[in-house]
Image (tube, rainbow, N blue to C red):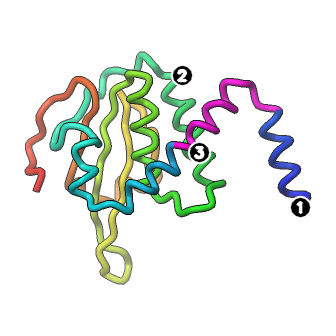
Amino acid sequence: MLEVFSKIKKFMRLDMQRRTLLIEAFFYLGRARYLKLLPFEKIAPSLGEQSTETSINSSIHYQMITDVSYAVITASKHTFWDSSCLVQAIAATRMLNKRKIESTLYMGIARDEDGSMIAHAWVRSGSLYVTGAETMNKFTVVKTFAKGPVYKQGFSSN
């Protein structure tokens, strides 16, 4: 119980913009978790243009991108549901899209130490990685979804 009060106190010490972003992130994480329950073919069109990326050279919204990243990653640690990498990635792209900030959602696959296939999702906006950056280098990109100005990739979307 003491831990709950400590977290509430910490939340109340944040400035209003951070508190608002955390609440918004919590909402988008819940919505993304629901979307993850649906067949992927149904949600894929809403993720952006398939097999494309946004520019890596654009980070004019640096502060907002880092604030969205902080909010999604922090809120994901306090949800009552599983906020996996894909849930975080969908939430982050929705929050950035709402602010008219371009982003690319990446999906990758790899094999774990037992040889089983594993998947990971992460988001990049400009040169900044918003979610999932900590393990992205272990994965081979199999799909990308871009929101905003895009350029075509050289790999198949299937």
Residue 67 in the image, given as x and y percentages of width and height: 57, 30
Q: Residue furthest top?
A: 60
Indicate yes or no whether the magenta region holds residue 14. Answer: yes
Contact, mark 3 vs mark 1 (Cβ under 8 Å): no
Where does label 2 land, which residue?
63
Contact, mark 3 vs mark 2 (Cβ under 8 Å): no
Please tell me in which quadrant of the rendered image residue 60 appears. top left
Looking at the image, residue 4 sits to the left or right of residue 100; the answer is right
Q: Which segment did they paint magenta?
A: 13-27
Please tell me in which quadrant of the rendered image residue 92 appears. top left
Mark pair 2, 1: CA separation: 34 Å
Mark 1 Cα shell of 10 Å, populated few (<14), some (14-19), many (≥20): few
Where does label 3 land, which residue?
26
**Residue at left offset 63%, top offset 38%:** 22
**Which element type, helix, strand or loop, lies under badge 1?**
loop
Mark 2 Cα shell of 10 Å, populated few (<14), some (14-19), many (≥20): few
Q: The C terminus appears in which quarter of the rendering?
A: bottom left
Question: What label does residue 109 carry, if any?
Answer: none
Q: Name the kind of residue labelled 1 in the image.
A: Met
**Residue at left offset 87%, top offset 49%:** 6
**Residue at left offset 46%, top offset 56%:** 33
Tell which circle, 3 or 2, labels the residue nearer the N-terminal end: 3
Tell which circle, 2 or 1, labels the residue nearer the N-terminal end: 1
Q: Name the kind of residue labelled 3 in the image.
A: Phe
Where does label 1 land, which residue?
1
> Looking at the image, which is closer to me, 27 or 110?
27
